[in-house]
Image (cartoon, rainbow, N blue to C red):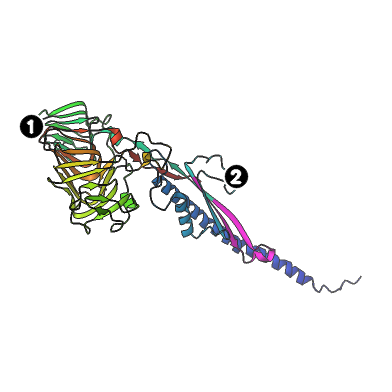
Amino acid sequence: MNLNKPQKGQALLILAFGMISLIAMIALVIDGGNIYSERRHAQNAADTASLAASLEKSDDMDSKGVVLDDGDTINWETAGLNIANKNGYNNNGITNSVEITNPPGIDCSGQVNSQFTSDEYIQVVIHITVDTYFARVIGRNNLESCVVAVTHIKPPAPSQNIQGNAIVALAPHECPGVKYNGQATTTLTGGGLFVNSDCESGSMAFMSQAHHAQLVAPSLTVVGAIKDSNNSLDIGTICSNDPTCATQSLYPPTFQMPDPAKDCGDRGTNYAVIDGNTLRPATGKWASNWDISKSPKFPPSGVTYIQPGLYCIYMDNSGFNIQANDTLTGYGVTFAVMTGSVTWNGGNGISLHAPVAPSDCLPTDPRSACHYKYNGLLLFLPMTNPSPIVWNGNLSWDITGTVLAPASNITINGTEDGFSLHTAIIGYTVDLVGSAISSIVYDDSLNYYFVENPQLQLTK
């Protein structure tokens, strides 16, 4: 036996197998690390895309949880795809694919998760393909992975205007939140008065200083204390400084605020149009802007009729002013005063009515007028506009719809016996200073329904 037989070539085989093992280990470290890093990035992208889609869907919901076409070009699916694209996943079908489904469809396991079958869930699935560097040696040109994210949308909850009150003062600590200085009887019908202020003792949340007059209402709810200097209250139910029946609401309010700027477009664009004595939205639009640069006053000189629609008004140091000799008529109108104050004085005839849902509409059809999101809203000043509202109204007024100005002081002054409003008044503070017999009538069907903010939760 030749024990000294040469072993030439075996070292090369060992080295070759060793190199393969070494490359496999490097592939595991480098290419495996790449796919792990890409998977983490994809998961973050899926999470944010799912939240973006859910936020857009909830933003487009009406008070019944029905998704509307709100006039913009973005729906929930597009919103999710846009965020995924910004994070590097453009749904090209080669290196990645993005699937957004509501209710959730097939997930990464190839199955539909029975836990998420409701349309309250939005699912984002991202499939990724990552090219390899070292794994090619062992026949793997790429690696694939999949991530999933699911967001739960708790739909917006509709509610009456703060317990169906005709007058609401939202200020949490203003003293007083509401003042009644009427010189003649003011009557609230269909809804009472709610004062959110917690002022007590000498400050008082609600103060009545009327002489030879009464405030008549079905209820008066005051978080803080009441002062009635002249026994001028004729109230069915009074709750004052009692947390069992007068619970303070959060401020700023937790209900959804309208977002008229989104619908009207950027300031300085999409102007409303004057046709003779008529102001109307821009052609083909239902919402338009009006700016002080177009006219030193609103309504513009000569305009006596407003066509149905949403009008975003920017008057800066000026305001939405109706003078004593003005006439103005509008049905199905909402005025969003983005900057500037509101002063309406008497008038030869003011007839302004918020849009209302027709009685025969189909509540399941999101295209129907049932779901128009400004139904019942006549006048809106956003939180960013604390300018005052002053109404000096007379018998010629014909007003329906909600006034929502959560940062403003609102003064209501009836100047002629028989002055009547079919409205809800919601402001930061409210002053009732009528010098004539007047009334405020609250009717659910004519007023804006508030919506508690939807809640989003990333569940997977």
Q: Amino acid at mark 2?
A: Gln
> Relative to residue 324, is residue 333 drawn left or right?
right
- Residue 425 image-quadrant placement: top left
Instruction: Tell me, yes or no, whether the highlighted magenta stretch contains residue 127.
Output: yes
For the residue pair 120 and 437, the one nearer the viewer reads as 437
Q: Position of residue 60 (x, y in %)?
A: 40, 46
Dot placed on the residue nearer the N-terminal end, 2 or 1? 2
Q: Which residue is mark 2?
A: 111
Q: Which quadrant is the N terminus positioned in? A: bottom right
Q: Which residues are magenta?
A: 122-147
**Depicted 374 relative to depicted 132: above or below:** above
Under circle 1, the secondary element is: loop
Q: On the rendered structure, is 229 left or right of 222?
A: left
Name the residue located 54 percent from the left edge and 39 percent from the top edge: 115
Name the residue: 63% across, 63% down.
27
The residue sitting at 90% across, 72% down in the picture is 2
Specify whether residue 304 is painted magenta.
no
Q: Position of residue 438 (x, y in %)?
A: 15, 33
Asked whether the viewer can see residue 171, the reply is no
Q: Residue furthest front?
A: 276
Q: Quadrant of residue 235?
A: top left
The residue under label 1 is which amino acid type? His
Q: Can you tell which mark lies on residue 211?
A: 1
Residue 432: x and y in percent read: 15, 37
Q: Residue 216: percent from the left, percent from the top? A: 17, 28
Kindly report the secondary structure that dominates the magenta region of the rendered protein. strand
Query: Does residue 400 appear anywhere in the picture?
Result: yes
139 versus 170 height, above or below: below
